[in-house]
Image (cartoon, coloured by chain):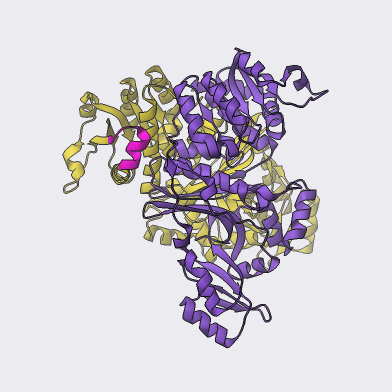
Chain colours: A purple, B yellow
Amino acid sequence: MKHIAILGYGTIGSGVAAVLRVNAKQIAARAGEEIVVSKVLDLREFPGDPVQEILVHDYQEIVADESIDIVVETMGGVHPAFEFVSQALSQGRSVCSSNKELVASKGAELLKIAKEHNCNFFFEASVGGGIPIIRPLSTCLTADDIDEVSGILNGTTNFILTKMDQEGADYAETLKEAQKLGYAELHPEADVEGFDACRKIAILLSLVTGKTVNYEQIPTIGITEITAEDFQYAKFFGASIKLIANSFKVDDQFYAIVAPMLVPAEHPLHAVNDVFNGIFVHGNVLDNAMFYGRGAGKLPTASAVVADVIEAAKLGHQYASYGWSEEAYEIGNPLIVRRRFLVRIAEESAEIDEKIKEVFGKVMHIHYLKGEGSVFLTEPICEGDLPDMVAQVGTLISAIRVLD
Amino acid sequence: MKHIAILGYGTIGSGVAAVLRVNAKQIAARAGEEIVVSKVLDLREFPGDPVQEILVHDYQEIVADESIDIVVETMGGVHPAFEFVSQALSQGRSVCSSNKELVASKGAELLKIAKEHNCNFFFEASVGGGIPIIRPLSTCLTADDIDEVSGILNGTTNFILTKMDQEGADYAETLKEAQKLGYAELHPEADVEGFDACRKIAILLSLVTGKTVNYEQIPTIGITEITAEDFQYAKFFGASIKLIANSFKVDDQFYAIVAPMLVPAEHPLHAVNDVFNGIFVHGNVLDNAMFYGRGAGKLPTASAVVADVIEAAKLGHQYASYGWSEEAYEIGNPLIVRRRFLVRIAEESAEIDEKIKEVFGKVMHIHYLKGEGSVFLTEPICEGDLPDMVAQVGTLISAIRVLD
């Protein structure tokens, strides 16, 4: 029998307890032994909930309980999660975490501690909720030179953008509806400003490069400026708009950005709608692959945490290497990235039309909606050149990147 | 340095050699040491190919070469692959195979031999080509009670059906085009009759149940009877037709079938087109997940084999359990499965219309194309009841299952 402690009895932590209870039989069969929650850490009380009997308020009680084999960390935030997790690993206890902030900022450091103490730090649930992506990247896509990882990594923004696309609705009203339905928080900044997706792509890119990507270096643009009109233009070009966490390699240098992007109908991520997440991977021999599923939610996320617990139980004191070191990976200068843009400027006229062709060269389509200015899809141009080029032809209303 | 032998220098075997050469640097970094092909077994000669220098025609030369650590089996067929692989495992050599016939019929037995000799039998490439699905099922979706695994598991048929859907073309001419392009073989029975997909779903269902599913018990219907008209009717109901390897659980009993099915636009497999494969999984806590990518082809399949080689190198003599035993799993009687059908009968008239409603109850849509008989979508009915029910209303032209 393996004894586990859960740190944080919020949505995910209570989901982990529920999954261990509901699927106890299968889980015991796969882990090779029963898995029992013997302590739960939370500052709150939960009167009436059976957890109350195993609830502790002081982490030191878990440290002192020698029966604990595996620790589940579902508290969120970097502190005190980092201190608790590193102490558990130092005791030779494997830790399974769903905490993207912790993994993005301390992942390599915690893996190092785990290695030193012959145990494991697993974090499948930190990216893509229930979607298996961390372990497949580390154990199944290892023969490839991976040159792109792009994902729809945030369910809240994908729900909002899908609604806007399907109903022609505006951002503000759709956000309100998402908040009513519980898909967006009252303070939705972490989601709608792209911060959540940014931490997740930093984790994936760290695993791909084997070094540590600082998420603060990744340009991050949210969805708050996207309008109903933008979706109309996107549709004209057979595309939708999604918040894409995009990383790709050119000449052995990775670049990364989080931004709303035009996703053409042919792209596998185009069909990823509502609260679902999708992670697209391109390798030099694998070609295209995609992983799809519920990127958030109590039970899907808990499913990934518990699968990590089973893996930790099976591996015991054998460290499973993720090949992720603390060495910093410097992502490339985003201004030299070349990509297509959907540009909208305030002006419209035959002269402007000529001017656009003169400055931008071959423009793939020009689409006039009278009174709405000019809208055009460029050929690939340098991100850093765009402001000057636009200034030569008119007044920028919006420029949306294209995921090619 | 790890030394490997490749059994069979056909498409996949030579792909494995190519991937090990092209991505040597990354592979060495991830495996922790260089991986070198030191012998290749094939009955043929390859004059001019550097493989000629390490080519052997007798497996015993590989058995006797004590430097070999890992064996790659890409011969196909059950014999003599089974004898070679079991001998290698008995020598404590891990084996990585892309051979679905071998895995479907001998997988559990080979895993047992691997376990007894502290080595591994890996077969990620046997299902879904480059798509990671075997290891994710065994290491990432373990917390779930999985109640459905359905896949588009054959690229040839998916290419043909996608063409028929997009171009309104007939089966025979599309098959010819696929043969010309090299996407279908001259003797395409294994693909178009569904045999290939059948073996693959048997492997996946064996992993899910932990027992051995006999692929010969899975009803298997190919795509040769699908017509251009069927696609028109499918489109009327917002669906496409795809060859689906479908397995699902009702009341703790798994059922399985391979058949062309109507796939509604909302289903994640609907967007899996051309030669791509997709595997849809539903778990009681995970909800929906899908894995997408190239299900065949030299390099994508070799990518999966080489990732297995890297995993085998990392694990050394530690056996990684897939929890798959030789005990037989009896799949349920297919005749009691309830599902919707798209039925076409030869007759059409107002009386037939009434009769259909009388026999089938609520029919979701009735669609008359003058002179083409009656076409209707049923509510879920028992597969075994369908022939009698149809006989009561007219002469069956076709009945296509719906993937719900």
Q: Quadrant of residue A11?
A: top right
Q: Residue at x 46, y 53 (%)?
A: A255
Give x and y (percent) for residue A290. 52, 48
In the rendered view, tell whether residue A225 sits above or below residue A140: below
Work out whether B255 lies above or below A62: below
Which secondary structure dominates the residues rendered in magenta?
A: helix
Q: Is residue B27 magenta?
A: yes
**In this rendering, does residue B246 appear at all?**
no
Image location (x, y in percent) of residue A38: 67, 17
Q: Is residue A15 left or right of residue A176?
A: left
Near-viewer residue (B291 or A120): A120
Q: Nearer the viewer, residue A245 or B14?
A: A245
Q: On the picture, is A397 further left or further right than A55?
A: left
**Residue stretch in magenta:** B25-35
Q: Residue at x 79, y 60 (%)?
A: B351
Which picture quadrant has residue A99?
Answer: top right
Q: Nearer the viewer, residue A142 or B42?
A: A142
Q: Quadrant of the N terminus of chain A?
A: top right
Extreme residue toward the bottom, this view = A350
| Residue drawn where x is 65% and y is 35% of the image | A76
Q: Position of residue B362 (x, y in %)?
A: 79, 51
Viewer-closest of A23 and B350: A23
- Specify the farthest residue to the top: A66
Q: Residue at x 58, y 69 (%)?
A: A237
Left or right: where A152 falls relative to B87: right
Q: Is residue B327 magenta?
A: no
